[in-house]
Amino acid sequence: MIMSAMTGAAMADRLSGRYAVLCEIDRFIGKAAALIRQSASPLEDIICAAAEDKRLGRLSFLADINRQLDGGRTDIRGAWRDCLENAPPEYMRAEEKAILEELGEMLGSTDVQGQLEGLSAKRDALRELIAEADRERREKGKLYRMLGVTVGLFAAVILI
């Protein structure tokens, strides 16, 4: 019974984790837009600021990029691709990775206005994913927990 309940809770946790990752990506986009708007910050500065932000801890690939840049790597787009590719898959689906890949290509490649427009478009797409993930988390999360407990109780009754 306990294993079934734990399995249900773990599946619900994955949904909550995805929602948290999406919210952190949204926070990163907001931070990048603010830095670009305020001081036309280059991508290196945006990554450094994001890597130091504790509220972006699930986006560990940003800290990995920052470490590579500090270590002397100069190919920032290559570092972005490599670190994102090697990021733990935990909670991140293909849609999220695609948005992050596109951000890595877009940031720093156009003028300030182009970057801000690109970030706005990515944020709009991301907000749809956030709404979907929130809905899944609320609806399916309860279902997974209840199903886990129910299967556990059913198994306990059969064993008795």
Image: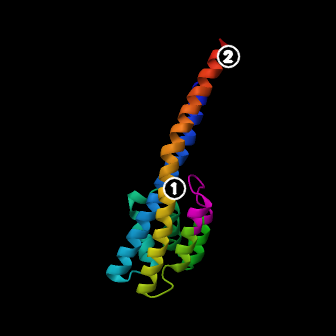
The C terminus - image quarter: top right
Height in image: 58 above or below 116?
above
**Which span of residues is magenta-colored?**
85-98
| Residue 73 appears in the rendering | no
Task: Please name the amino acid that badge 2 sits on.
Answer: Ile
Dot 1 or dot 2, earlier in sequence: 1
Q: In the image, which disc is placed on residue 28? A: none
| Residue beneath disc 1 | 132
Q: Residues within 10 Å of mark 2 (few under 14, many from 20)?
A: few
Percent from the top left, x then y, of residue 25? 47, 63
Height in image: 153 above or below 53?
above
The N terminus - image quarter: top right
Q: In the image, which disc is placed on residue 158? A: 2
Task: Please name the amino acid that badge 1 sits on.
Answer: Glu
Q: Is residue 93 magenta?
A: yes
Quarter of the view holding residue 26? bottom left
Residue plotted at (44% across, 88% down)? 111
| Residue 37 appears in the rendering | yes
For the residues labelled 1 and 2, say whether their Cβ atoms are less than 8 Å apart. no
Q: Secondary structure at mark 2?
A: helix
Distance of label 1 from label 2 (alpha carbons) = 38 Å
